[in-house]
């Protein structure tokens, strides 16, 4: 779109005779129309004469000067509005005349480290790509309005953020930095690509290099950076307590309970009135145990067992009756509702309930009478359910077991109550076999654990895997959760149609599923998706096949991403992963608020015979609980990544065995075998060749040597650098794969 000088001279003459008299659009010169059309195509983007000249192809100084004069004239005429000095936007009244009527979409910002962003629409449509210069004043998580750009062929949805409707947050964690008399707070989060400018007088005694909390106070139109003030100094980066608190504060999770909550908790009595015991089914003389991690303090589930006179087995799943102590609308209840869940960082637990409740009054500690809400089952030797009962109980646990003690007995060792434990394990195994036969997907679970010294510094790591003792408890908890959900939701239930809190899990996203199948086929695996049954069998067979291989992490991660996220909802769609038509969370009210809601609803409907509660009200509570669960999982992952980086910090230069766990355009990712620490080997550290990315086949290939690095390859790496603040680790390769012939590369 280049303009010759004669066109511009024509415009100057034309402007003096007709433009100043405000002729209608169709009498304006092509030159003026072009300028207005350009503004119409970007109705919210301020532009100056240099930007216009570049777009129009005007390169000479005289032409640029004319554009400068045109803009001033159009502004005086009211067709342009000066946004800031010498920079203009189109008068909104003319947008329909000079540009396409903008289509607006409301959504949530997903900000990237590069400054570009994606907006996830509220209506569930395709994500909208936002260039870094079109994000406006939006930050990660904000609710925004986007003006859509005209759809370009074979391009993703694109747009410009024109308004921030709701801030996700106004307080952030970062490093206070002073340089050349200016102060900034630099966030260590990749989703915060901008730094906060801190005016003098707003430092709050923060010192250069300290970790602080900054509050967003202003964002002037002519400033690229938001303005803020330091509201709290956390301490020095790298100190364990500072880093753990930073993770919690970054996700706006409270560090302590409000005074009114602690006061209310202090007034709760740990004595059980005899009148309350009389209202309940008494299990105090029935063999009862808890099985938990050895460092657990809150025991919210117990298992009872006895052989009935008819030869059948009675198994009771007893859950702490938190609802007896925490009443709706109380200070404790409001705080628990807001927190949604307990958070388990590497070195600490941040409970949903005050310590007096979670570790004392409600915790099912041995040799103490406790109030419980229970699901009790009568079953035969095949673990077939013959009778079931749901109601309030009182128990007295005989023994607290750690998983390791029970596992030792299952594997042939001796211990207390071995006979009862082996019977329970046999029944649990049969329940599990039935569940798997009915289509439950066996997602493998590995958890990185750390051995910490007295200063909370990691001195060793290990991987905790699910064993029979863990699954013994899990299978009975699944049974209780399913039974409680069926009691309300099944069509033949008298409570069918009542509002309830379900744990739901939707079917896989078809597009993601086909991408996943393409991925695993390139890795040499096949999947049958002809029916749900064959798909589930393929998933389970695949998980077994990748166990212990380099691609395991990628395959299991992507497999999970093909699945919808499990959520809390009042609308029951079943649980796809477990293959349960009805499922809820009933078994952990000490650490999950939805379980407490379920207890209250069960009591309201099945014991008190009260009418249904408001679905609209409970759906809002479900959505909040789902969001808090997501945040808790992210906080826990952040703390693990920090401890992994801390673990490797004093191992710079040491060599470890690992597996290639990912391939990217920046480098290859390697996961260390023992600690599961994952770091990057950057391409610029490869000194033997130039490598190109064969993304489709998850490998890189040397241009000259034809060496291949493939997902899953075993390698040795040296620890080169650790960034504790960013939780990033850099490796270099020590061993390299063999050269392959060109014929073998397809």
Image (cartoon, rainbow, N blue to C red):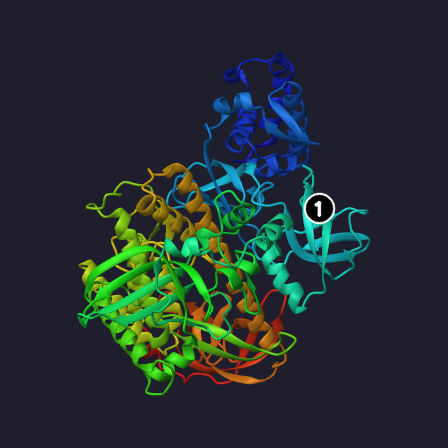
Q: Which residue is mark 1?
A: 228
Q: Quadrant of residue 71?
A: top right
- The residue lying toward the viewer, choosing from 163 and 703, is 163
Relative image position of residue 245 (x, y in whole percent):
63, 61
Residue at 29 percent across and 75 percent down: it is 425
Q: Relative to 621, is 59 on the left or the right?
A: right
Q: Relative to 709, is 258 on the left or the right?
A: right
- The residue lying toward the viewer, choosing from 281 and 502, is 281
Residue at 71 percent across and 46 percent down: it is 228
- The residue lying toward the viewer, choosing from 56 and 170, is 170
Q: Quadrant of residue 219?
A: top right
Q: Relative to 7, is 421 on the left or the right?
A: left
Relative image position of residue 406 (x, y in whole percent):
38, 79
Relative image position of residue 349 (x, y in whole percent):
55, 64
Q: Is residue 480 above or below residue 428?
A: above
Q: Is residue 540 above or below residue 3?
A: below
Residue at 65 percent across and 23 percent down: it is 75
Where's the C terminus, which quadrant?
bottom left
Relative image position of residue 10 (x, y in whole percent):
60, 22
- The residue lying toward the viewer, choosing from 489 and 648, is 489
SS of the residue at dot 1? Answer: strand
Q: Is residue 607 above or below residue 463?
A: above
Query: Is residue 698 visible in the rendered structure shown here?
Result: yes
Q: Relative to 183, is 100 on the left or the right?
A: left
Tally the numbered discs: 1
Query: Is residue 526 visible in the rendered structure shown here?
Result: no
| Label 1 environment density (alpha carbons within 10 Å; few <14, some 14–19, many ≥20) | many
């Amino acid at each position: 779109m280049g303009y010759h000088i004669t066109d511009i001279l024509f415009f100057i003459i034309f402007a003096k005779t007709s433009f100043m008299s405000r002729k209608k659009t169709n009498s304006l010169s092509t030159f003026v129309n072009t300028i207005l059309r350009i503004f119409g195509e970007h109705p919210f983007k301020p532009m100056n004469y240099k930007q216009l000249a570049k777009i129009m192809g005007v390169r000479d100084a005289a032409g640029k000067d004319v554009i400068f004069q045109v803009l001033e004239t159009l502004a005086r005429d009211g067709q342009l509005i000066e946004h800031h000095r010498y920079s203009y936007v189109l008068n909104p009244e003319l947008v329909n005349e000079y540009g396409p009527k903008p289509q607006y979409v409301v959504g949530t910002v997903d900000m990237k480290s590069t400054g570009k962003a994606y907006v996830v629409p509220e209506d569930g449509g395709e994500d909208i790509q936002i260039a870094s210069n079109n994000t406006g004043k939006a930050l990660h998580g904000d609710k925004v309005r986007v003006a859509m750009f005209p759809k370009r062929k074979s391009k993703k949805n694109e747009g410009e953020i024109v308004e921030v409707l709701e801030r996700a947050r106004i307080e952030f964690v970062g490093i206070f930095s002073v340089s050349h008399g200016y102060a900034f707070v630099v966030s260590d989060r990749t989703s915060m690509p901008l730094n906060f400018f801190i005016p003098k007088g707003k430092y709050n005694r923060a010192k250069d290099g300290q970790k602080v909390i900054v509050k967003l106070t202003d964002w002037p139109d002519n400033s690229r950076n938001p303005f803020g003030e330091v509201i709290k100094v956390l301490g020095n980066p790298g100190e364990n307590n500072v880093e753990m608190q930073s993770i919690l504060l970054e996700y706006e999770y409270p560090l302590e309970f409000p005074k009114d909550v602690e006061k209310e908790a202090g007034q709760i009595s740990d004595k059980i009135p005899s009148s309350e015991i009389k209202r309940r089914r008494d299990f105090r003389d029935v063999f009862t145990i808890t099985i938990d991690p050895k460092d657990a303090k809150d025991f919210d589930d117990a298992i009872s067992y006895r052989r009935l006179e008819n030869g059948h087995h009675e198994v009771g799943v007893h859950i702490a009756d938190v609802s007896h102590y925490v009443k709706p609308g109380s200070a404790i209840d409001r705080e628990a509702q807001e927190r949604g869940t307990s958070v388990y960082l590497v070195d600490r637990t941040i409970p949903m309930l005050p310590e007096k409740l979670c570790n004392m009054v409600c915790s099912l500690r041995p040799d103490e009478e406790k109030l419980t809400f229970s699901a009790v089952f009568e079953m035969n030797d095949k673990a077939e359910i013959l009778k079931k009962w749901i109601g309030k109980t009182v128990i007295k646990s005989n023994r607290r077991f750690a998983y390791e003690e029970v596992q030792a007995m299952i594997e042939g060792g001796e211990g207390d109550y071995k006979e009862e434990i082996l019977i329970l394990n046999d029944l649990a195994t049969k329940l599990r076999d039935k569940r798997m036969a009915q289509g439950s997907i066996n997602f493998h679970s590995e958890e990185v654990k750390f051995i910490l010294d007295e200063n909370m510094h990691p001195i060793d790591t290990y991987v905790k895997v699910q064993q029979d003792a863990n699954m013994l408890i899990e299978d009975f908890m699944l049974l209780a959760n399913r039974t409680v959900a069926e009691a309300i939701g099944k069509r033949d239930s008298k409570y069918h149609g009542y509002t309830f809190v379900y744990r739901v899990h939707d079917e896989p996203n078809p597009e993601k599923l086909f991408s996943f199948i393409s991925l695993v086929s390139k890795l040499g695996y096949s999947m049958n998706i002809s029916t749900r049954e064959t798909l589930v069998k393929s998933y389970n067979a695949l998980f077994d096949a990748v166990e212990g291989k380099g691609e395991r992490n990628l395959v299991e991660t992507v497999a999970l991403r093909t699945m919808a996220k499990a959520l809390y909802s009042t609308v029951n769609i079943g649980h796809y992963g477990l293959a349960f038509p009805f499922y809820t969370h009933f078994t952990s009210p000490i650490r999950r608020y939805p379980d407490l809601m379920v207890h209250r609803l069960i009591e309201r409907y099945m014991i008190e015979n009260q009418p249904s509660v408001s679905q609209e009200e409970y759906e809002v509570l479900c959505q909040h609980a789902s969001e808090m669960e997501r945040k808790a999982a992210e906080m826990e992952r952040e703390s693990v990544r920090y401890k992994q980086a801390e673990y490797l910090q004093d191992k710079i230069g040491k060599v470890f065995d690992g597996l290639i766990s990912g391939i990217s355009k920046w480098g290859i990712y390697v996961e260390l075998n023992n600690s599961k620490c994952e770091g990057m080997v950057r391409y610029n550290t490869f000194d033997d060749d130039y490598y190109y990315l064969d993304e489709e086949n998850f490998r890189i290939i040397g241009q000259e040597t034809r060496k291949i690095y493939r997902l899953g390859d075993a390698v040795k790496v040296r620890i080169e650098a650790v960034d504790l603040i960013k939780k990033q680790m850099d490796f270099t390769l020590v061993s390299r794969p063999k050269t392959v012939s060109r014929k073998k590369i397809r």
